[in-house]
Image (cartoon, helix red, strand yellow):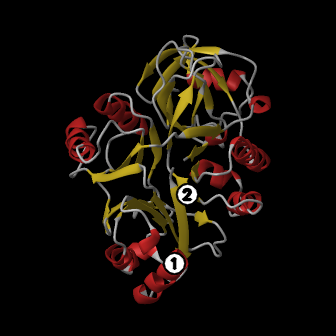
Amino acid sequence: MIKAYTAYTGEVDDAETAVAEIMEQLGDISRLSENAVGLLACYSDFVDSGVVKELCAALPFDVIGTTTLGSVVRDSEGRMILSLIVLSGDDAEFAAGVTGPMTAADEAPLAAAYDEASRKLSAKPALMIIFAPLHINASGDFYVDALSRISGGVPVFGMMTVDNTSDYRNAAVISEGDAYADRCAFLLIGGNVNPEFFIASVPSERISAEKAVVTGAEGNLVRTINEKPVVDYLVRLGLKRNPDGTIIGINSFPFVVDYNDGTFPVVRVMFALTPEGAAVCGGDIPEGATMSVGHIDAEKVLSTTRGALSKALSWRDDACFLIFSCVGRYFALAHETTAEMQLVQDVMKGNEVPFMFVYSGGEMCPVGQKMAESGELTNRNHNDTFVLCRL
């Protein structure tokens, strides 16, 4: 069984004070199993000031993590914080790893790092938690698909990194106190662990009843739907097209994509339209997939988050939660940007479950089969989605 402990600090300038605050909240770390590991999330300022480096040096176990534009743990206060969750367990195994530099969608660095880390476990891991870089030419689908092949189907749960700048220029993956824009960090968990996954995204009442078929696509570029340019399909649904060919607020109307392989649909955000009327999406969409158009707003961000948390808590409360939520949901909250984080705090106050919530640039979480009797999971990349792993 895994036990978890959380801590946080808002001290960004004084590394000594920040480390002291974290250590005080963790208490006597000698009570932790020899098998322990830390996951952290923070504003990039904590990297620049040296707080991350000093904290990782002070902790007697491996630490990996990410920059972000918002995170919370139990009872944390303030918006600009560093959050930490420590996982420990006498009957669990942990192995942290980080790739070498990655400049493109190349599986070799992932395979080498996975092989090295997996050798530290006595058996095949039950879960892989990953923090993937944003600033290389590789999508979330690449990481999910590549690591699924490399690991032989280990469940992959994780996120693409972001940060608190307007263009995510400082987004970085963190490993042992160092920050990387071009490396992927991951944690393998083995032993007596049974991860369970919960997903919240566009609610069914905000999804168009009209189904369509993707007839032309290449990776994350969708050229035609029902044999017509994507822009024509969107206009026919009622979206307004500007004289220059753009559609205002296009990323508020994501595609809900059914792979037609028995798994539950996933969400793909549209980032832009090409001059030819194709859609540039936040993840791959295969030809032949069935899709509808959805809509997400602040009200539904909060209601779906509450629903996912309530479901996870109703099943079992002797666990810990790792939670990633898309920055698209953050921006859908408009001027109430802390509302989802505050909702998580409010819902979790009624129990003792340790948790860490982090905003992400893309979410990775297994999906189940539509047929309830099947327990098979398929790793998927998501957009505009709230994902929760219960350990």
Q: Which mark is residue 305?
A: none
Q: Residue at x 68, y 15 (%)?
A: 211
Binning the other alpha carbons within 10 Å of mark 2 as few (below 14), some (14 to 19) or many (20 upward) gives: many
Binning the other alpha carbons within 10 Å of mark 1 as few (below 14), some (14 to 19) or many (20 upward) gives: few
- Above or below residue 159? Residue 32 is below
- The location of residue 29, given as percent across then percent down, is 44, 74
Say what secondary structure mark 1 lies in: loop
The residue pinned by badge 1 equals 27
Q: Residue at x 34, y 40 (%)?
A: 138
- The location of residue 242, given as percent across then percent down, is 65, 37
- The location of residue 363, given as percent across then percent down, is 51, 43
The reply, left or right, for residue 231 in relation to residue 151 is: right
- Above or below residue 43? Residue 293 is above
Q: Give the mark toward the camera: 2 or 1.
A: 1
The amino acid type, in three-letter code, at marker 1 is: Gly
Viewer-side residue, 242 vs 168: 168
The reply, left or right, for residue 115 in relation to residue 52 is: left
Viewer-side residue, 62 vs 177: 62
- What is the count of numbered marks? 2
Q: Which mark is residue 358?
A: 2
